[in-house]
Structure formats: structure tokens, C-alpha cells
Image: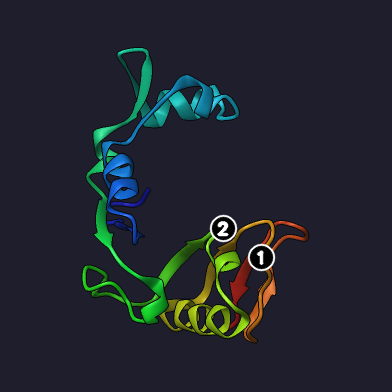
Amino acid sequence: MPSGSFIIATDIDRTALADAERAVYKNESLLEVKNEHLDKYFIRESGNYALNHEIRSMVTFACHDVTTCTSPKEGIFSEYHLVLCRNLLIYFNRDLQKRVQKQASSVLRPGGYLVLGEAEAMIGPGFAEFMPHTKIYRKGS
């Protein structure tokens, strides 16, 4: 990752955030990760894999409810390059899905990416599917 990069990880569930902040994964959960990525981004720790300190130090964890359709207070910047919103929208009605997608669009820079889950669909305008059948969408300029 480029120097000065930062990642904001949010969830409404504080327990899920605490687990994510530990950044320790069992071998079984990383079976599909290439060895070169494991060697580069993880360290072996008590039979598990822990995300290396360089990457961990880039991440700020914040409890945030996306249904408020506001940015997390920790995310003082806008024009994000990437928003991951996987397997979240499926729990919302269509109106709320549209509002959350609109909020994601408002913080993404032109050319930025919005990634949805397999069962989710892009509702609003301004995005084009980046790669067919991936649920990765690119924001227009």
C-alpha cells in the first residue's frame, strides 16, 4: 500500500469490531489466500496468522451505523478510493438500500470502487460494473 494510506473499518457490532481489531485468523479461514500474500502481509502466531503491524497500523476501527447515512466521525476525509459494503444491504428494505448506496457514492472519489455482496445489486445511477459478475462497481467521473 502506498505510504500515507489509511483504512477505516466500521461495524455496528462492537464485538465484531474487537475481533477485527485483533486481526488474528485461523489457518482454515485463509486457505484460499496465496502463500505469497500470507508471507507478505501476515506473521505466524500461535498456529494462526496475524496481520502484520504495518497494515494493522493503517486501520482505524469505528462503531458506526450505516443506516444513519452519514460518514463515521473517524472518517473525516472524503473521496475514498474503495468502499466495501458486502452482505450488508440484503438486510435493508429497498429504500434504505438506495439511501446507503447514495451515501457511499457521496464519499467515493470519481473512479472509486464500491464492492457489494453476491446477493446484492446496484440500485442507484453513476456506477458501472467494473468486471462482469463480480459485484464490483466503479463510480463515473
Q: Amino acid at mark 2?
A: Asn
Q: Which mark is residue 107?
A: none
Identify the image quadrant of the C terminus.
bottom right
Q: Which residue in the protein does label 1 denote?
A: 120
Q: Amino acid at mark 1?
A: Glu
Q: Is residue 23 left or right of residue 97?
A: left
Q: Nearer the viewer, residue 139 or 117?
A: 117
Whether tag 1 and tag 2 are in contact, CB under 8 A, the answer is yes
Residue 86 image-quadrant placement: bottom right
Mark 1 surroundings within 10 Å by alpha-carbon count, few (fewer than 14), some (14 through 19), many (20 or more): some
Q: Give the percent coordinates (x, y) of residue 124.
A: 63, 84
Residues packed near mark 2 inside 10 Å, few (<14), some (14 to 19) or many (20 plus): few
- Distance of label 1 from label 2 (alpha carbons): 7 Å
Judging depth in this view, the residue of 68 and 50 nearest the camera is 68
From the viewer's perspective, is residue 35 above or below residue 81? above
- Tell me how the rendering is colored: rainbow
Q: Quadrant of residue 68?
A: bottom left
Residue sitting nearer the eye, 126 or 124: 124
Question: Quick check: 103 left or right of 126?
Answer: left
Which residue is pictured at 34% across the width and 61% down the height?
12
Q: Dot 2 lies on which element?
A: loop
In percent of width and height, residue 62 lies at 25, 60
Instruction: Choose the circle earlier in sequence order: 1 or 2.
Output: 2
Quarter of the image for residue 31 reads top right
To which residue does mark 2 refer? 87
Q: Is residue 18 above or below residue 30?
A: below
**Seen from this angle, which residue lies furthest top?**
47
Q: How many marks?
A: 2
Q: Is residue 121 left or right of residue 112?
A: right
SS label for mark 1: loop
Q: Is residue 101 above or below residue 83?
A: below
Q: Nearer the viewer, residue 41 or 32?
A: 32
